[in-house]
Image: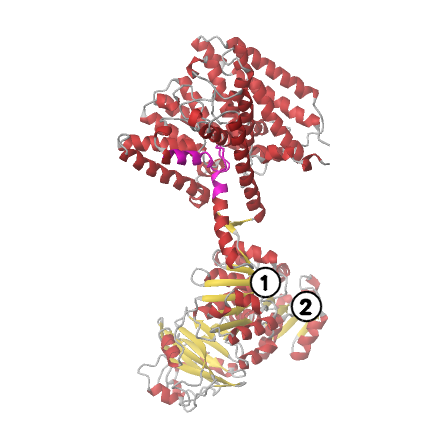
Amino acid sequence: MKIIIAGAGEVGYHLAKQLSNENHDITVIDIDNTSLDRVDSAMDVLTITGSSTSLKILKKANCEKTDLLVSVTSSESVNVNTAIIAKKLGATKTVARVENAEYVSTENQELFKSIGIDHLIYPEELAALELVKLIQRAAATDIIEFEDGKLSLIGLKLDANLPVIRQTIREIAHTIEEITFRVVAIHRGIRTIVPSGSDILLPNDQIFVITTHEGIEHIIKLVGKDQTKLNNIMFLGGGKIGRIAAKMLEGNINIKLIDSDMGKAVELADYLDKTLVIQGDGRDLDLLAQEGIIDMDGFVAVTHDAETNIITCLMAKHLGVTKTIALVDNVDYIPLTQTIGLDSLINKKLIAANNILKFIRKANIISIATLQGIDAEVMEYIAQPKSEVTKKQVKNLKFPPNAIIGGYIRNNQAYITVGDSQIEPNDKVVVFSLPGTIHKVEKFFQ
Amino acid sequence: MIKKNVILNFVGFLLILEGIFMLLGIPFSLYYGDNDVNVLFFTGISTSLIGLLLFLFTKNKDKEIRKREGYIVVSIGWIVTSLFGALPFVFHGSIPSYTDAFFETMSGFTTTGASILNNIEDLPHGLLFWRSVTQWLGGMGMIVLSLAILPILGIGGMQLFVAEVPGPTKDKLHPRVRETAMRLWGIYVMLTFTEALLLFAGGMTFFDSVCHSFTTMATGGFSTKQASIAYYQSPFIQYTIIFFMFAAGVNFTLHYHILHGRIANLKKNEEFKFYLSVIVFWTLFMTAVLFFSSYGSVESSFRDSLFQVVSMITTTGFVTADYETWGTLLLLVFFLFLFSGGCAGSTGGGIKIVRHLLLFKNSLQELRRLIHPRAVIPVRYNNHSVPQEIISNILAFFLFYIFIFILGSIIMASLGLDFMSAIGAVATSLGNVGPALGTVGPTDNFANIPDIGKWFLSFLMLLGRLELFTILVIFSPAFWKS
């Protein structure tokens, strides 16, 4: 596929890297030479310096023959204009990043289609949705839902004194009557392994489990994390993410939101009905103490500054807050944060890139997600008739060792895969895979 | 520099308008064969002529009204129209003292409804009509009417509008102030017309139904009968008047939305809900008290309570029963009603419901602010936070109001009024209500107040009608510094 990416910021960078690894032909346009140098040195793509709204530049990028144009610069109006112009120049599909909830609502989809934008993404809103999910399922470090939650992939941290520790996965499976979940990956230290039945669980492992809706309670109980509801949450940072998430949560949860900017605090106090908005520096321990951080169940740091978010979350953890979530937009920090004890993190750039990838792979993949912190992907395929995967039972498939079929949905009913499972045509299949195996996996479904 | 020409020009226009309205009573006088035709004709014509001369001689290209001119035009406009409006009563001789006539006219224009007349029915019909017209004009405001009529007024219309229709909430119905003024007067005329029709159908004479609908919609309270509405024992008439008093106490912007089918605005409006619940609560409370003190049947207890509660809260001041005989508890409540007022943007006077509501909310939030000193805790009204400037404006308003009330009471007491009468007279004048307590209660009048007292109360009425600041600002040193 020929793809043009306008904007070589974090989202564009990650997207270009991901797509070029999958052998697409990528052209990256940006006005800033330094950003392009970074792209050039890290991946095999073509870079063009110039404005993406310039017809000359777009033609130079061979826009008329391109299959997809993704505009992800930091400016909403540049993105919208780029997409419209590119469409007129002949790009087959266009995607634009916006900063406006109104634009991405389903009712306005047709309007944007008619002016030439096929898909819009609003990364801050996507990140806020993710944040809300993490708060509602406080026990999990990651949650990815498939088919409205019929199947989910959840990440869980293992504490030291659990009965399941030092048992093999096969042994654990024997203690359970009905299989409602399946461990698809273990993240240990800095390594991720796709486990077989003989692998054992160790303290401080992070496990990833594919589970049916009913299985969630089950697995959470098994790892000793009861479904504790978070009743009091402190938010740090009233940017778009904090604002949207607080608005969605404030009906059910007591929220205190701290922002250092007075003007913003006043505006937030107007927008948020039940949230208590506090103006002050979130790094000020006295302020946090005064506002009762000790009594909080959750601490969410979503300021623009990744360092502040990480530090304050560690501070909150130290003070005994059950669940901490940090917004970390700097990809380089992600492996680190896993080892120093943050519960969950969100990265709006990865989330945005995931959303675009999902749109790109629409053919027979209906959903895809890159897990944050571990280098792996979860995909949802539709098993095509006569494809490889439908021919044998799962245990006889010779599936790549770094990939695993977690579960499938047949006639709106979710099932967890076991050795004897037989995939049928048109099943929706959730596959977990480490990088480099995606191509091998895809072959099974075509 | 204050532009004198602009001010005089506008006042001239107001006088032309006033003279024309004086003439409107003549047909009734002719029909009833009264002796006030000549007086009305000559005063009307000469008022208009003086206005016309003023208007023509000050004609100027510079029509721009700035903030300061706005305040002065409105203040002077109200005073001058009251000065001229008193003339027909004096020239006819039915109110020989100019002080009394001015008090009566100011009480009319400010929609207070306090009267010095010992026997209202003695007045000829033309003058009675003029008395009702003063209230009707004052209710929605002559300045607002001029804004609707005068096409030439360029920039600055808004300054006048704000000075005459103050209040903490601003809702323009149209981008142009002239269109807004036209719409407000349109609704006002329509409601008045409907009420007159209903009252006529209920058995009032044509003359009385017009006069009463004028003074109801203005929340004025002048009746053509000495006994006020108690004269009409028909429940239909009383309920009709209750309904229109209630409607007049509602923000006219809401009426506009309802007329356009946007009923949802009513449910969302916190002030309206609060206004309604206050009325419902006190009516039920009083009905119960009256019924159990064997006042009458449930219906008559209910009707009298409802009538008196609505009449006092909307600052109309009509009377169907002497609430001074209802016991100390209810009398105290009625005294407090003098401070309530209708909704903002209604024709009612007083402190206004929205100010009470916001003050109350702010006080509650202040308690939360003590616990969370760093928190930003706004006062929310109609789902939006109210800017702190508006809150402090309301606080200042409230403080001035109470201060003026106290000072006024001291002055009235020093003129020889007893305690109840002094505080009642001041509260009722400042709140543009009408009846008060003691010697100026619902069945009495203001005839026996000393002359200085009448002038002073007239001033308080104007102060209250223009919601303090329009007048007070003129007395501030900052106003006169260039």
Q: Residue type at mark 1? A: Gly
Q: In which quarter of the image is residue B269?
A: top left
Query: In 3D space, how far apart are the residues under numbered discs 2 and 1 (Cα atoms)?
Result: 37 Å
Residue B42: x and y in percent read 57, 11
Label count reads 2
Crowd tier of the residue under label 2, counting other residues whose Cα lies within 10 Å: few below 14, some 14–19, many 20 or above: many
In the picture, measured across the screen, residue A279 lies left or right of residue A30, that is left
Instruction: Return the residue nearer the eye: B354 or A361.
Output: B354
> Can you tell which mark lies on residue A280?
1
Residue under the point 46% across and 83% down: A185
**Disc 2: host chain:** A
From what the image shows, is residue B223 above or below residue B381? above
Work out whether mark 2 precedes mark 1 in sequence or the reverse, and give the earlier one: 2
The reply to whether residue A386 is in sight is no
Instruction: Return the residue nearer the eye: A97 or B125.
Output: B125
- Span colored in magenta: B330-356
Residue A364: x and y in percent read 47, 73
Q: What element carries label 2?
A: strand
Q: Residue type at mark 2? A: Asp
Decide whether residue B338 is among the magenta residues: yes
